[in-house]
Amino acid sequence: MCKDQLSIQFRSVILPALIILLSGAKLAQADVTQTIQPTVNVYQSVAALENDNALRPKEGTIAVVLGYRYPGDGGGGQFFFSPSDSRKANGGTVLPVRGVEGGRWNRIYAGSRYVTYFGATGDGKTDDTAAVQSAVDDTPDGGQLVFPLGKYVVSGIRVSRPIKLLGEGVSKWESHGAELLAKGNQAFVLAFSHESDTVPGVALGGEISNLALEGGGHALSEGVFVGLGFSEVTIRNLEIGHAIGNGVRLQHWFEGKFENVFFNSIDASHSDAVFFIGPIILKNLAANVNNLRIYASRFEGNFGTYIKSDSRANLDIFVLSNCKFEWSGQTWHAAEHFPLFDLDAAFRVQIFSNSITQFRFGRNYSPILTVAAGSGSLPTSRGAGIKFFNNDFSGLDNDTVLLDSRSDAVAQWTNNTIMDSSFSKKVGSESPRKNIVMDDFLKYDHF
């Protein structure tokens, strides 16, 4: 171990233990008869502490562990012996005591939990599913779970309570903090799922920040991120990408906000959409999604419909603004045909101040926006109120922009700027054409 590592260990582990020891000594001076003198024992790993069958700890015994598997791996810390604790050991904050029927080792920490407390490695090779899931399950409502920099290989992590997941480091587009990396084909990488087969309960709160959810090029049947039965969740500084299937899939989701999220290299051509609002496979909950907002995010190099609400989704109040949509113009899947935005059973929608560029090959992306249309879609019972305004378009093919309105849906297309594109505005073929407003175009032939 180098000098710097020894210095860090002294400051972060040994020095605090000495402070505890000195504090006990001061108390002993005040009342020798009532103070329990702490005993400090040092171990190389959590396993070494758990397997010490020679130690017979008493109340006040302190154990200093230098690492979870080895010194300096982030899983070390200080533990105290509690003789009256009978909780189930969880491998991270509560440890068993070898040879002692009652009592537990309790980790000493304040504030956030770390996944490394439970043995997560983040080395990009080890399967960290069990360790990360244990850390998630141990974090109480409103608590914060931290992922140090690294790649955590997982087979799907499920969060059932409103907690905060935080990756260390700064995340901005491709430069992100910690990664959750899919281990092979699976249902999802991460799910905020509070589900019930009988009563559609909702968990209130939660946050995900500074993380990357990576599909690893695998096929995910439900999505890279799944949201089911949550309200008031904030998702920011996140990368979601490199998967076959949905990027995000939401059902029974309320007051949700996605901010500064990068959707990258998702092939949704044989699934629902890069961002899908609608029923999740084999789930028996209501499909309502209300007050969904996507801000300052980026969709780049994906394929298939980018944002879609299913006819059963009942999407009400949806704001999409200040986002960038870009396609690199690949010719693969050239015979397939997708709308960029496909909004069915959607009400009170505002799409504004976005940049939409390089969606060439009109046979792939035409129309840009479909409203309350599609085979078998249910008639809406009220005006949809779709407002599409102040958006910038460039690098589009002819007839790429089309509005198709059916039932009593109302679509307004105003003050959009078209640059460097051959363009023809069209409406759907239903007769009579109604409730469509398309005006105030600012068109330029070149940048």
Image: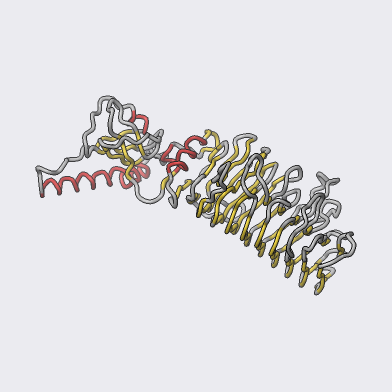
Residue at 28% in and 31% down:
102
Q: Quadrant of the N terminus?
A: top left
Q: Nearer the viewer, residue 432 or 97?
A: 432
Task: Give above or below for 48 relative to 235.
Answer: above
Q: How is the image coloured?
A: secondary structure
Horizontal and vertical percent for residue 236? 56, 56
Task: Say which of 115 and 446 sits in front.
Answer: 115
Q: Is residue 83 left or right of residue 373?
A: left
Query: Residue 191 appears at what percent x and percent y?
Result: 57, 44
Task: Answer with left or right where residue 369 lies relative to residue 51.
Answer: right
Residue 346 drawn above or below residue 139: below
Q: How many numbered callouts?
A: 0
Counting from the top left corner in percent of width and height, residue 175 is at: 58, 52
Residue sitting at the far bottom = 440
Dividing the picture into quadrants, the one containing residue 433 is: bottom right
The image position of residue 271, as x and y in percent, is: 73, 43
Asked whether residue 124 is in view, the answer is yes
Q: Is residue 182 left or right of residue 273?
A: left
Is residue 358 at least partly visible in the picture?
no
Seen at 30% across and 38% down, the residue is 64
Q: Is residue 447 above or below residue 65?
A: below
- Residue at image position (55%, 55%) is 231
Q: Quadrant of the C terminus?
A: bottom right
> Residue at coordinates 78% horizontally, 56% vertically from top-left?
379
Quadrant of the rendered structure where residue 97 is? Answer: top left
